[in-house]
Amino acid sequence: MIMANDAGTQAHAAELAFAVHAAPIHAASVSRLIGYWADHGLTIRRDLRQIVTAIDDFVVAIHDERVVGCGALETVGGGIGEIRSIAVDAAVGKVGAGRAVMEALFAKAHLRGIDTLVLLTKIPDFFTRFGFEAIEFDAVPGEYAALIAAQSGRTFEGKTIMRRVLVPQVPVVQVAPVMTGVEAR
């Protein structure tokens, strides 16, 4: 929820994208976004069937009632998750779609109990803004290296390997005020 103190801030907040868990109705839009960036060599193409099958891994950014960004979190195992298929509509201006997607994926990782995120990218500067750091191959978690090796067409070559260790979220607990004998009557 966005709260604003003045009309100018409220107008700016209305211009920003927000992220939600993806649903099957979003699959065609996700496919279109990923396809665009796959054509430019920046992500791996996923067909509609793959997206529908993995829809629970996706989040989408919404702006002006349409999908303008997406990303996925694949659980690797051993507390490790892979960020995949980050794509933002190139025709949309700076509406925070990439930020909304990344923050939603971090929240999804916390919900899944994932404490380490990894990814492969040709554009590391984007991910550095979100706390990712480049790592050498010898620092790649074994579970992740095995996943990449098992998937046809995926390789570490020509890409930056990045990692972010998540800080555990402290659960928020609301505590009722202590009542004295006088207040309880």
Image: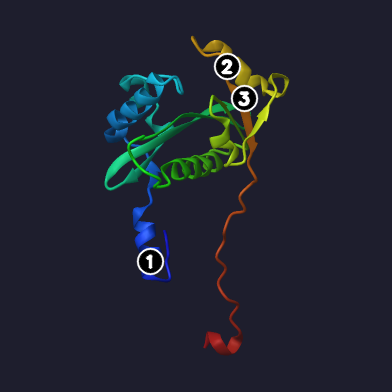
Q: What is the number of the mark on residue 137? A: none
Is the N terminus in the top left, top right, bottom left or bottom right quadrant?
A: bottom left
Q: How many residues crowd mark 3 within 10 Å: few (<14), some (14–19), many (20+)? A: many
Q: Which callout, 3 or 2, points to the residue nearer the camera?
A: 2
Disc 1 secondary structure class: helix
| Amino acid tagged 2 | Gly
**Where's residue 37, x and y in %?**
40, 25
Identify the residue at image location x=40%, y=71%.
6
Identify residue for label 3: 161
Q: Nearer the viewer, residue 126 or 19?
A: 126
Q: Nearer the viewer, residue 130 or 177?
A: 130
Q: CA distance from mark 3 to mark 2?
A: 10 Å
Q: Which callout, 3 or 1, points to the residue nearer the camera?
A: 1
Q: Nearer the viewer, residue 41 or 148?
A: 41
Identify the residue at image location x=34%, y=62%.
11
**Where's residue 125, x and y in %?**
57, 34
Decide which of tag 2 and tag 1 comes sooner along the chain: 1
Identify the residue at image location x=47%, y=44%.
99
**Where's residue 179, x and y in %?**
58, 81
| Amino acid tagged 3 | Ile
Q: CA distance from mark 2 to mark 1?
A: 44 Å
- Colouring used for the render: rainbow
| Amino acid tagged 1 | Gly
**Where's residue 70, x and y in %?**
40, 35
Q: Is 136 on the left-hand or right-hand side of 96?
A: right
Q: What is the number of the mark on residue 158? A: 2
Q: Is residue 121 above or below residue 145?
A: below
Decide which of tag 3 and tag 1 comes sooner along the chain: 1
Disc 3 secondary structure class: strand
Residue 160: quarter of image: top right
Identify residue for label 1: 8
